[in-house]
Structures are given as structure tokens and as C-alpha cells.
Image: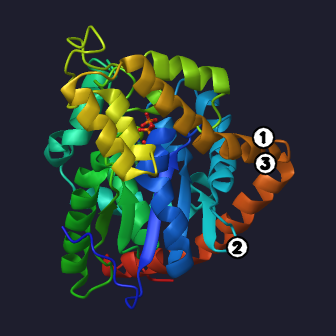
Amino acid sequence: MNNQLDPNKKEKVLTGDRATGQLHLGHYVGSLQQRISLQDQYEQTILVADLQGLTDNGHNPKKVSSNILNVVADYLAVGIDPNKTTICLQSAIPALSELTMYYSNLVSVARLQRNPTVKNEIAGKSFGASIPTGFLTYPISQAADITAFKATLVPVGDDQLPMIEQTNEIVRKLNNVAGEEILVECRPLLSKVTRLPSMDGKAKMSKSMGNCIYLGSSEKEISKAVKSMYTDPNHLKIEDPGQIEGNVVFTYLDAFHPDVAYVADLKAQYQAGGLGDGTTKKILEECLQETLKPIREAREGFTSDKAQLIEILKAGSEKSKEESNQVLNDVKRAFGLDLF
Ligand code: ATP
Ligand code: MG
């Protein structure tokens, strides 16, 4: 996997987030920070994935519809600039659903069932025998999203690596059918923190698990979450040597504290004994409060102007419609379905 960026190369960047809740700290370090810096160098599109959100919420669509603008407000609050980045809505771009339909003919059910992320998510969602077809096939729809914008670079957390692999398989198959290079392959761009854990250190922080510190979390919620973080269960007295591995407080200090040397000192002290969990949690809480305060405040401003959020999403979707229709036409031609 090539994680190197070449500023001279014309890359097209595409990412998205399911509209299943507010964005959280995992999004921030896993993908949003990268997008903020990429928007100055490259052409970037960000997709609010409402259709993908529906794949496990078909019976509870409000969860998706009520979160679309929340996600847009989160983007703006962290500094994604709609003048530099196109922000669009998946359901407003018909070519994405059409492409999914075409690509479905190139992917076997067995291949979808083998996708490790989908497998893992199915196990965690207790669907039983009633897995929605849309859920099993969402990697195909994600391939449609990526290829519709001819994206070459996809900044994601590591749970998305199997989706990139599956996308590239579809690209190769389609190009093979076409006999020419219609679609382009993409590569993931992983950040320093590829999977931010939740407070208990077990699962990844994720909207559907509700185990999150959100970008809009209040001071109180942040404080409560930090206090509940898993540390080292054998570090009973302050003078005891403590363990860093698996200690969520240090995982977060590594992810969020700007002073790397200071965190290294803290780690050394903790490992030697003499540094209590109360102190490390206090340091982390201060750091997170400082990081999230300006984002929360900006977010409040954006959520109070719903019309502006809708306008941004609409303009971005219009632009994306045109762009994706071009790829759709090429794909239809590849299947010989371009009579008129
Ligand atoms: P859901 O539970 O509805 O699937 P989610 O919290 O997993 O929501 P997504 O919208 O599925 O969020 O993911 C959007 C992007 O954010 C993806 O690139 C994903 O890899 C990244 N991401 C999500 N959670 C984390 C995390 N905890 N650490 C790092 N990256 C993450
Ligand atoms: Mg997810």
C-alpha cells in the first residue's frame, strides 16, 4: 500500500461518512484531519452517505434523515471549506445507485460474504438470518461512490481497507469487460491513528455503538467519558509501575496531544511508577476540552442555520451529479447499453 502523497500528481480525493449520527473523535483523527489538509492540494469530494446509512436502518429511516445536516455541520465545524471541497448527498446523485446496479453483476455473493468488515459488522448487529440485501452489498455501492468521481485517494480508517480492495477488484473487472481503462484504481490514505478505540478500549469508536465522544459533546460529557476510560487494572497505587499498552488514556494522548516529547515523558514516568491515573486523565481531559471547544462552538453556529447547510449540500450534489453521469455513461457503454 502506498501511503505517500505526491503533490505534483493530480489526485482526486473521495471520502464519505454514513449519516447515522454525529461525527466523533474517531472520524476526526481517522479521516477528517487528512481531508482538511488535502482540500488545499487536491480536488476533493465528500459524500454524506445516507443510502449506506439506510442499509442497516431501513426500519428506522429517521435515524438517517435526521443526521444528514448534523454531518454537514460537523464538516464545516472542523474546517472543511465548501469552496474548496465538494460536499454532496448520496441519495441526490442517481448515477451512484445506477452504477451499483451495474457493478452488482460483477461481484459474487460469496465474495461479499468474505469481506472481513462486512462479516464483522454483521456479527455485531444481530441481524440473525435477516441481513438486509442492501447491507450485504454496501461494498458495491461504496465502489460506485469512489469510481463515480474517478477517485484515486481515499482517506479512511483501517476498517475501510477491505472496501478499497473490493473497489479495485470491481474496477479491474469492469475495465476487462470494457476492453479499455474506463475506471481508475484507488488507494487508501491512512492517518496516524487508523482505529480510535472507545473508552473501554475494546471496540472501535463508532456511531452505531453509541460509545463515542462526539465533536459536539458537551464539557460534561467529555469529562465523564475520560473518567470512564480503561487504564491498567494492575496499576493500583500511584507508585506502582503502570502499563502503557492497551491503556486508553495513553492511546488518546498519542492521538490528540500536540506535545509528543511531553507525552513520552509521561509514559516513562507512568511505566516507572509515580504517576497516577487521576493525573493522566486530567491531562487528557484538558487536551480534549481544548481541542473540542472551538469545534463545538463553530458547530452550534452552523446547526442554527439549517438553510445554509441545505444550500451547501444541494450545490455540491448538483456538481456531483454532472461529474458522476459521465462515468455512468462510460459504464453503460462498456455493457453495450448506449443505444440512445
Ligand atoms: P457507523 O457505526 O454508522 O458505521 P462509524 O462511526 O463507523 O458509523 P462511518 O461513517 O462508518 O463511521 O465511517 C466514516 C469514516 O470514518 C471511515 O473512513 C471510517 O474508517 C472512519 N472511522 C470511523 N470510526 C473510526 C475510528 N474509531 N477510528 C478511525 N477512523 C474511524
Ligand atoms: Mg462504520
- From the viewer's perspective, is 230 left or right of 323? left
- The residue drawn where x is 30% and y is 23% is 124
The answer to whether residue 201 is seen in the rendering is yes
* SS label for mark 2: loop
Quadrant for ligand 2 reads: top left
**Can you say whether 25 is above or below 146 in the image?**
above
Q: Earlier in the sequence, mark 3 or mark 2?
A: 2
Residue with the most extreme top position: 236
Is residue 95 something one can see in this rendering?
Answer: no
Q: CA distance from mark 3 to mark 2?
A: 16 Å
Q: Amino acid at mark 3?
A: Phe
| Image: 29 above or below 135 | below
Mark 2, residue position: 83
The label on residue 228 is none
Q: Quadrant of the N terminus?
A: bottom left
Q: How is the image coloured?
A: rainbow
x then y, percent, for residue 160: 31, 50
The answer to the question of whether label 3 and label 2 lie on touching residues, with beta carbons closer than 8 A, is no
Q: Contact (CB < 8 A) between labels 3 and 1?
A: yes
Image coords of residue 216 (percent x, y): 65, 35
Disc marking residue 300: 1
Drawn side of residue 74 relative to residue 42, left or right:
right
Is label 2's Cβ within 8 Å of ligand 1?
Answer: no
Can you tell which quarter of the image residue 9 is in?
bottom left
- Establish whether ligand 1 lies closer than 8 Å to the Cβ of label 1: no
61 with respect to 77 (left or right): left
- Density class for disc 2 (Cα within 10 Å; few <14, some 14-19, many ≥20) is few
Write down the residue under mark 3. 302
Gap in Å between the C-alphas at discs 3 and 1? 6 Å
Residue type at tag 2: Asn
Q: Amino acid at mark 1?
A: Glu
Position in image of residue 265 (x %, y %): 31, 41
